[in-house]
Amino acid sequence: MESIIRYVLNMVPYMIAMLPILIAVRISIKLPIIKEGKKLNIVHEIGVIIFILYLVGLASQTIIPKFELGRNSIEIVGRIGFDYNRINTIPFNKIKEVLSLVRLGNFNYLWIEVLGNIGVFSVIGFMLPLLWTKLENIKTVLLCFSISVCIETVQLILPRATDVDDLIMNTLGGLIGYIGYMIFKRLFPKSTSKFKGESEL
């Protein structure tokens, strides 16, 4: 659990830095609509901003390289470039390793590798259909899969690991989030309708 909290705290500076830029971009996009006299869904706009900030935070921990101050410059931590040793193409290999550690009493990797990967994408699977009506279908899960593929592909050249198990767990997380949204919608239909926007951002 401490590891997940640390990851979340590491996301915050990137999200804070992005917030004013994102607000400015949203205003520039929506200003013509306001000038036309059309009603702006503020709840939807707030939801979109929160969602994009979340994606920025996710990117900061998955595809943005880590930097540290060197003697005369800022340096990237780790080696950039393709490394086959950082790739796992065997399904459920990582999951088996994590379960082996759990049996030995080590739950740290369970939180990070399994519950973390699933939990991170369950948020995406929930937010996409919440914000956009046209994503209240299997497209949400496919989008989660596509986002995960993009992350794992970029990580091929970064000093990070690329793992097919991450892809499996991310997609599962997206599915769980989508199912959670459908349950939430059935229980609170009026609340979900407040967040709805059109197909465009």
Image (cartoon, rainbow, N blue to C red):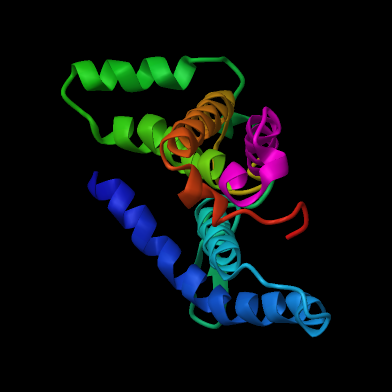
Residue at screen point 57% across, 29% down = 171
Instruction: Tell me which corner region of the image, top left, top right, bottom left or bottom right, holds residue 49.
Output: bottom right
Dominant SS of magenta comes to: helix
Q: Nearer the viewer, residue 144 or 91?
A: 144
Name, please, the residue furthest toward the left.
Answer: 105
Image position of 103 with respect to 25: above or below: above
Image position of 47 with respect to 25: above or below: above
Instruction: Tell me which corner region of the image, top left, top right, bottom left or bottom right, holds residue 99.
Output: top left
Pinpoint residue 40: horizontal percent, then vertical percent.
67, 72
Magenta run includes residue 129: yes
Pinpoint residue 71: horizontal percent, then vertical percent.
49, 80
Left or right of 150: which side holds 125?
A: left
Which part of the image, by quadrant, shows the N terminus?
top left
Q: Nearer the viewer, residue 192 or 100?
A: 192
State whether residue 138 appears in this view: yes
Q: How many marks?
A: 0
Q: Nearer the viewer, residue 32 or 70?
A: 32
Residue at screen point 56% across, 56% down = 195
User: Which segment did they paint magenta?
Assistant: 128-152
Image position of 95 with respect to 183: above or below: above
State whether residue 82 appears in this view: no
Residue at screen point 50% across, 28% down = 179
Residue at screen point 54% across, 44% down = 124
Left or right of 173: which side holds 157?
A: right
Pinpoint residue 42: horizontal percent, then vertical percent.
58, 70
Pinpoint residue 170: horizontal percent, then vertical percent.
53, 32
Which part of the image, by quadrant, shows the C terminus?
bottom right
Left or right of 8: which side holds 193?
A: right
Instruction: Tell me which corner region of the image, top left, top right, bottom left or bottom right, holds residue 145.
Output: top right
